[in-house]
Amino acid sequence: MPAPPPGTALLAELRTEIARADSKAAVLVAALGVIVGVLGGLLTSTGWAPQQLSGAAKVLLALGGLGIAVSLVALLLAVLPRFRRSNWRPGRPLGYFGDIRLAAEQGLLADALADTERLAADAVRAALAENSLIVSRKHSWVRVGILSFGAGLFPLVTALFLG
């Protein structure tokens, strides 16, 4: 079996990377939920209250909570579906699902598919550009989520130990 053309192979790799980024973010959101749930459960079951903390510990608790909240938002943004306005127009190849939807709404899907087949290299380039943008955004949000989780966890735990 011959190897797929480089553009097609890259596109498959990008789509796999999108799935990996989504999986990483989903696992991290679940882990974040478990950690926060366990900490919250332990603290409330022992009768702990933030008013018992010293001034420095209250500041650390607030900073830690902020870091955890930023982490959750960033990780949710990583898995948020991406929608943008399609700039497809008749005579151009289809590049992503928004283009397909727009062509179908205009009753031009059959023509658009024929154009996409005729302009296969252009279609692959358009899909590569779109998918690489999605991958880089997802990875950026996962990175922000991990860093803010780490930055939030340290002051949170420190505040609890300082009491």
Image (cartoon, helix red, strand yellow):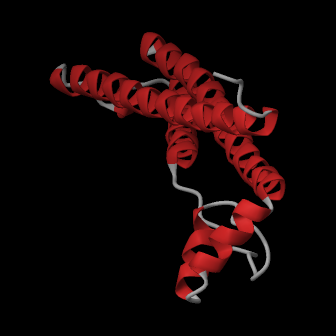
Occupied quadrant, residue 114? bottom right
Q: Is residue 147 above or below residue 114?
A: above
Percent x, y for residue 22?
51, 36
Percent x, y for residue 44?
21, 28
Q: Is residue 102 visible?
A: no
Total number of numbered discs in the rendering: 0
Looking at this view, is 2 or 56 the one in front? 2
Location of the C terminus (image quadrant): top left
Looking at this view, is 11 or 111 the one in front? 111
Q: Is residue 2 above or below residue 162?
A: below
Locate residue 8 relative to residue 76 in the image: left or right.
right
Residue at left offset 60%, top offset 26%: 146
Q: Is residue 22 above or below residue 116?
A: above
Locate residue 69 relative to residue 123 in the image: left or right.
left
Residue at left offset 65%, top offset 79%: 111
Residue at left offset 50%, top offset 29%: 61
Q: Is residue 151 visible?
A: yes
Occupied quadrant, residue 4? top right
Location of the N terminus (image quadrant): top right
Occupied quadrant, residue 84? bottom right
Residue at left offset 65%, top offset 26%: 147
Q: Residue furthest bottom?
A: 106
Q: Residue furthest left?
A: 45
Percent x, y for residue 77?
56, 48
Locate residue 42 relative to residue 27 in the image: left or right.
left
Q: Residue furthest front?
A: 1
